[in-house]
């Protein structure tokens, strides 16, 4: 499904004072329906890997294939369609503070030109999926950290993506809310959604018992089917 192929990303000296190799000849595949954790300490290259996959950054060399298409050599229209197949979840939620839970999710449909009928149909469905029906009219400041992250996941789900990219989604959460979010991601995976989780949380990784790709210094140093955090 996704193939990171000899991916290298180097930031030149004029941007960082000193040339910085963030990714160094990274290669691995993500199969459809997998739940994979990409782990490593801060600065290992995890976020840059996601940015390249989303088309927000271009690799210095190598490429990324999504269903055998080079994501950096497709038309703008194809790139837009591709991004809709990938839902994103971040550590800091990125919710709109002046909008309710319902409105935050609906907004993701509004900006893509969805009809009022589709919004009224699909938003309640994802609210039910993430168990936030009762909080639909609450604003982000009225939610717990776990509820905010579940709202962010609902927003990521609204276009029925094939892949969820979760970049440190439990970084701001306590153990209880961390478990809630992980269970939700696992349930989504069981229903067929591919999950790519980026984290440096040892306990999260070790509790999952799923495939783990470990980055260190921009290189893949381990790829284990039922891995543990080894750094």
Image: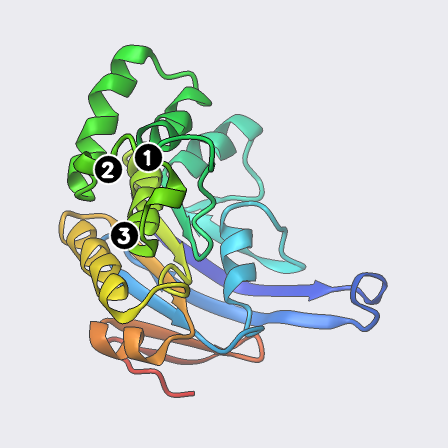
Q: Is residue 51 left or right of residue 186?
A: right
Which of disc 3 and disc 2 is earlier in sequence?
Answer: 2
Which of disc 2 and disc 1 is earlier in sequence?
Answer: 1
Residue 146 vs residue 144, the one in the foreground: 144
Q: Are marks 2 and 3 in contact (CB under 8 Å)?
A: no
Assess disc 3: are there few (<14), some (14-19) or many (≥20) residues with their C-alpha within 10 Å of its C-alpha: many
Task: Give me the C-alpha separation between circle 2 and circle 3.
Answer: 27 Å
Q: Residue at x 35, y 83 (%)?
A: 229
Q: Residue at x 37, y 75 (%)?
A: 201
Residue 32 vs residue 94, the one in the foreground: 94
Extreme-front residue of the structure: 142
Q: Is residue 136 left or right of residue 164?
A: left
Assess disc 1: are there few (<14), some (14-19) or many (≥20) residues with their C-alpha within 10 Å of its C-alpha: many
Compared with residue 105, is residue 25 higher up or lower down, i.e. above or below? below
* Residue 145 position in % (x across, y down): 34, 55
Q: Are marks 1 and 2 in contact (CB under 8 Å)?
A: yes
Residue 59 vs residue 176, the one in the foreground: 176
Q: On residue 43, which mark appears? A: none
* Residue 17 position in % (x across, y down): 84, 70
- Identify the residue under disc 3: 194
**3 or 1: mark nearer the eye:** 1
- Identify the residue under disc 2: 135
* Residue 185 position in % (x across, y down): 23, 55
- Identify the residue under disc 1: 101
Q: Quadrant of residue 22?
A: bottom right
Q: Residue at x 22, y 66 (%)?
A: 176
Label 1 sits on a secondary structure element that is helix
Compared with residue 167, is residue 203 higher up or lower down, i.e. above or below? below
Label 2 sits on a secondary structure element that is helix
**2 or 3: mark nearer the eye:** 2
């Amino acid at each position: 499904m996704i193939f990171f192929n000899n991916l290298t990303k180097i930031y030149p000296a004029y941007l960082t004072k000193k040339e910085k190799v963030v990714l160094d000849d990274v290669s691995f595949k993500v199969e459809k329906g997998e739940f994979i954790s990409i782990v490593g300490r801060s600065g290992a290259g995890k976020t840059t890997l996601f940015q390249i996959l989303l088309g927000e950054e271009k690799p210095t060399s190598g490429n990324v294939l999504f269903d055998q298409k080079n994501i950096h050599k497709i038309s703008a229209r194809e790139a837009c369609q591709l991004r809709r197949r990938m839902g994103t979840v971040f550590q800091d939620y990125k919710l709109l503070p002046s909008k309710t839970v319902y409105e935050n999710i609906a907004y993701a449909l509004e900006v893509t030109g969805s009809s009022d009928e589709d919004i009224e149909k699909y938003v309640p469905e994802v609210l039910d999926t993430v168990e936030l029906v009762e909080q639909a009219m609450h604003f982000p400041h009225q939610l717990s950290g776990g509820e905010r992250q579940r709202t962010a996941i609902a927003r990521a789900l609204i276009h029925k993506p094939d892949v969820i990219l979760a970049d440190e989604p439990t970084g701001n959460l306590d153990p209880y809310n961390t478990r809630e979010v992980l269970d939700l991601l696992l349930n989504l995976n069981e229903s067929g959604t591919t999950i790519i989780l980026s984290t440096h949380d040892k306990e999260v990784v070790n509790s999952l018992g799923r495939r783990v790709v470990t980055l260190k210094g921009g290189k893949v140093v381990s790829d284990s089917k039922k891995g543990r955090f080894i750094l």
